[in-house]
Image (tube, rainbow, N blue to C red):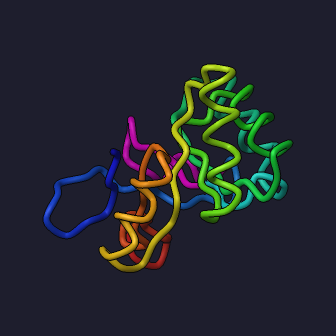
Amino acid sequence: MIIIGHPDIPFDPLYYVESIEEIVKTPSNSTLWLGAFADAKEIAQHCYENHIAYGVMAESVNDALLANALHAQYILADHSLASKLQKIAENYLFDAKILVPISDESEMEIVAEAGIDGVIFQDAIIFSEQS
């Protein structure tokens, strides 16, 4: 199980960007956080074309399918959608990992029992005002 952002486990944070221009402000070789896929398709396309690792939030199966086709590293979704996406990801051999955003360690067990790739804590994402 992938666990990103837990205080006891070292991790590489995701850097939130809202535009292609903001990418240059992030550390080289970092993974970007684009937010909702529906609002970040242009940035996702740019990341795909330039081989930049990124994660997005999927709000539908179609979002996840498109994000995977654009080589997203992480596809985040709420628990109920993540369960559906995990089955699709296994069937179609997604390269992207399906993650559920959580706020408490106790939620990890539920995600693990559902067979979802992993979890991500809010602290794993660095927003521009923190950098």
Q: Position of residue 120 (x, y in %)?
A: 42, 61
Residue found at the very far front of the displayed protein: 113
Q: Position of residue 80 (x, y in %)?
A: 67, 62
Q: Quadrant of residue 77?
A: bottom right
Drawn side of residue 38 relative to residue 12, left or right:
right
Residue found at the very far left of the displayed protein: 8
Q: Is residue 8 magenta?
A: no
Q: Position of residue 28 (x, y in %)?
A: 38, 39
x 71%, y 40%: residue: 44
Drawn side of residue 28 relative to residue 86, left or right:
left
Q: Is residue 30 magenta?
A: yes
x 34%, y 46%: residue: 2
Quarter of the figure that contains the C terminus: bottom left
Part of the protein shown in magenta: 21-33
Q: With respect to residue 45, does 19 lie above or below?
A: below
Drawn side of residue 69 relative to residue 117, left or right:
right
Drawn side of residue 119 relative to residue 32, left or right:
left
**Front residue (pair 54, 20):** 54
Q: Position of residue 38 (x, y in %)?
A: 84, 54
Quarter of the figure that contains the N terminus: top left
**Front residue (pair 33, 22):** 33
x 71%, y 34%: residue: 46
Q: With respect to residue 102, does 98 lie above or below?
A: above
